[in-house]
Amino acid sequence: MPILYSYRRCPYAMRARMALKQAGIPFEIREISLREKPSSMLNVSPKGTVPVLVQQDGTVLEESIDIVFWALGEQDPDSWLGVDLAVIDELISANDNEFKFNLDRYKYPDRYPYLPQADYRAQGEVFLQRLENMLTENQFLMRESVSVADIVIMPFVRQFANVDRQWFDKAPYPKLRNWLNYLLEWEGFLSIMEKQPTYLD
Ligand SMILES: N[C@@H](CCC(=O)N[C@@H](CS)C(=O)NCC(=O)O)C(=O)O
């Protein structure tokens, strides 16, 4: 079986787990401690981030997006890749760069005292507004059903919302709130959030 080094609460790892599950690919999950990364993982991926997928032939995928596209390339029962991939690419880039940058600063204001927390939140809201606009056109980000866009973006919106859920619940993004609430209860998400024992070499 392929091996996935993962961390339950990591949004990048969530993407990979959702895609592997959707593709029906059995995998051994190794829940790591970020403080004490297993040397078997660092040996194959010295950069030390999760997720990392080690395939049966030894091929290593060490970027979440590579794992998502590989898994769905193997099997894609609900055509999650049947959307405009150029739009997806740009959306992922906006998420993984600007939005993630602001999310980290909004989430950990003590580590980033240069600007008030609310400023980072406001900068992050540019992306939230973009998603809200997309959800005005369709029920999910790219169409009327879940696609790859939803599963790669949702874990990050979840983190942003959880920084101050009271604020998020009143913020002017009602469609985004419904979308997130739906996906949080969705089996495809719940099933990948089960707790796992920590893997030690
Ligand atoms: N670009 C990478 C980013 C992965 C990433 O940054 N993962 C975080 C956890 S959410 C990590 O492993 N950080 C290393 C650490 O905290 O030591 C990907 O898409 O897979």
Image (spheres, rainbow, N blue to C red):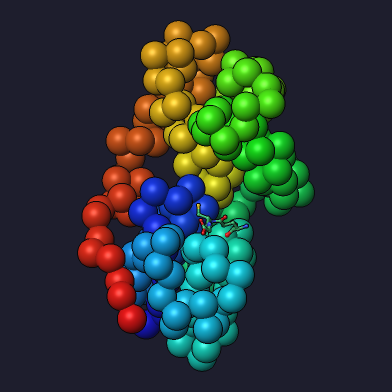
Q: Position of residue 88 (x, y in %)?
A: 68, 46
Q: In which quarter of the image is residue 97?
A: top right
The residue lying at 49 percent from left, 73 percent from top is 53
Residue 169 locus on image (x, y percent) = 42, 14
Q: Is residue 124 above or below residue 5?
A: above
Quarter occupied by the C terminus: bottom left
**x 31%, y 75%: residue:** 200
Q: Please name the residue shown 35% across and 46% down the image.
A: 189
Q: Can residue 175 be seen in this view?
A: yes
> Based on the displayed image, in which of its 4 quarters is residue 63 positioned?
bottom right
Q: Which of 201 and 151 is in front in this view?
A: 201
- Residue 74 % position (x, y): 52, 72
Q: In this view, does 29 lie to the left or right of 78?
A: left
Q: How many marks?
A: 0
Quadrant assignment for ligand 1: bottom right
Q: Can residue 103 be seen in this view?
A: no
Please give the name of the residue rendered at 62% of the width and 39% of the height, measured from the top-left corner. Answer: 100
196 is higher (above) or lower (below) than 125: below
In the displayed structure, 180 sits above or below 116; it is below
- In the rendered image, residue 41, in percent from the top left (x then y), is placed at 47, 77
Image quadrant occupied by the N terminus: bottom left
Front position in the image: 158 or 140: 158
